[in-house]
Image (tube, helix red, strand yellow):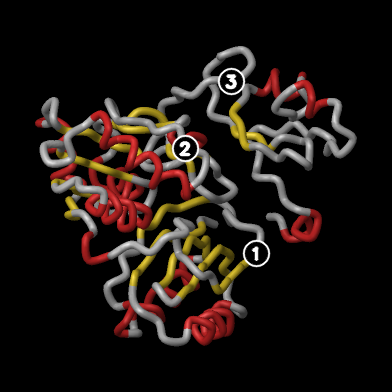
Amino acid sequence: MDYHVLAYYCFTPLENPAREVLLHKNFLGSRDARGRIYISDEGINGQMSASEEAAGEYQEWLKSDPRFAGVQFKTHLWHEHCFPRMTVKLRPQLVALDQKVDMGKAGKRVSPEKWKAMLEARDAETVVIDVRNKYEWEVGHFEGAELPDLEKFRDFPTYARELKKGRDPKKTKVMMYCTGGIRCELYSALMKEEGFEDVCQLEGGVIGYGLKEGTKHWRGKLFVFDDRLSVPIADGAGEVISKCRYCAELSDLYFNCANMACNELFIACKACAAKMQGCCCSACEEAPSRRPFIAQDRPKPFRRKHLLGTSS
C-alpha cells in the first residue's frame, strides 16, 4: 500500500486558531493519517502521510473552507507512514522567526518553469539563495546557489543584514528558495525590508520544482522533516553529493547523535556510524546518556521515549 505524503501551507488570518486545532483533531482522529500540523493566527502549515482515501477526504474538507480554498497540496507516494502519529498543535508563529514581517512585501512568486529559465539566464547581479539550514542544503541544493551557514530559522535575519555589506540591494536580483515555499514567504518580505528591491521566490519550493521540472539544475537530494529524511526530488534514485563527516565517503544517511544530551543531526556512512556507535564525536561516544546504536539501512529520526511505541 502506498501512502500519500502531503505538504502544504496557507497564510490566512484565523480569529480562533485554537478552534481550528480542535476541528482538525476531530476530523483526522478516526482516519488513517499521521503528520505534523501547526496552526496559528497566521494560518496553517502541515505535512502528513495518509491513505489515498484519507488524503482525498482531508484535502476536500480543508478546501471546502473559503479561507483555505487556495491551498496548494504537493503530493508524493511512499511505502509506509512518514510520521509516528498525528500531531496538531497551536503555535504562536508558523515559522520561528521571532519578529513580525509585513507579508504584503513578499517577493514575486515564480513558477518552476520560469525559475528554471531564470537560472539559465542569470547574470553577475543575480544571487540565488538557499534559505534552508545547513543540515538541509548539505544533502542537496541548486547549482551555484549561495549556501548560508545557518543552524536554525531564526538566523536568517542576521544573514540578510550581512548580505547588504557585500551586495548593492538596489542592483542585486535575489532568487530564493526553500523546501515547500513557506519560509520564502517570510524571508522574501524580510529581504525587501532590508532594502533589496528585486526579490523573487520559487513557488512551491523545491518539492514543487521537482514535481514539475525534475532535476534540471538541482544537485543531490532533498532533506524533509519526516522519517524519510532525504528523498529524490523527482523519480529515480537521486544523486548523492553529501559526504560522511568522518571519512568523506559519499553518503546521504542522516543520524541523530546517540548522546541524548546532544542529539545533533549529521551525515555519516554506515561503517563510520557503526564505528562511532551512532555518535557525532568522540566526546559524545563517551557520554553516560548514550542510546544503544542499532544499524539500519535507512535510519529514522530519533524518537523520544513516549513516541517509541507509535513508530511505524
Residue in the image at 54% along x and 80% along y: 21
Q: Name the residue under label 2.
A: 150
Circle 3 Cα neighbour tier, 10 Å, few/some/many (<14 / 14–19 / ≥20): many
Q: Mark 3 points at which residue?
A: 244
Give the amino acid at mark 2: Leu
**Of 156 and 130, the residue lying toward us:** 156
In this picture, is 62 found above or below 266?
Answer: below
Secondary element at tag 3: loop
Q: Is residue 95 visible?
A: yes
Secondary element at tag 1: loop
Give the amino acid at mark 1: Arg
Q: Mark 1 points at which residue?
A: 85
In this picture, is 220 found above or below 180?
Answer: above
In the picture, the disc for residue 291 is none
- Distance Cα–Cα, label 1 vs label 2: 29 Å
Place residue 295 in its image quadrant.
top right
Residue in the image at 18% along x and 42% along y: 115
Residue in the image at 32% along x and 49% along y: 205
Secondary element at tag 2: loop
**Of 302 and 298, the residue lying toward us:** 302
**Of 208 and 142, the residue lying toward us:** 142
Does 180 sit left or right of 195 as displayed? right
**Mark 1 vs mark 3: which is more N-terminal?**
1
Identify the residue at the far front of this view.
165
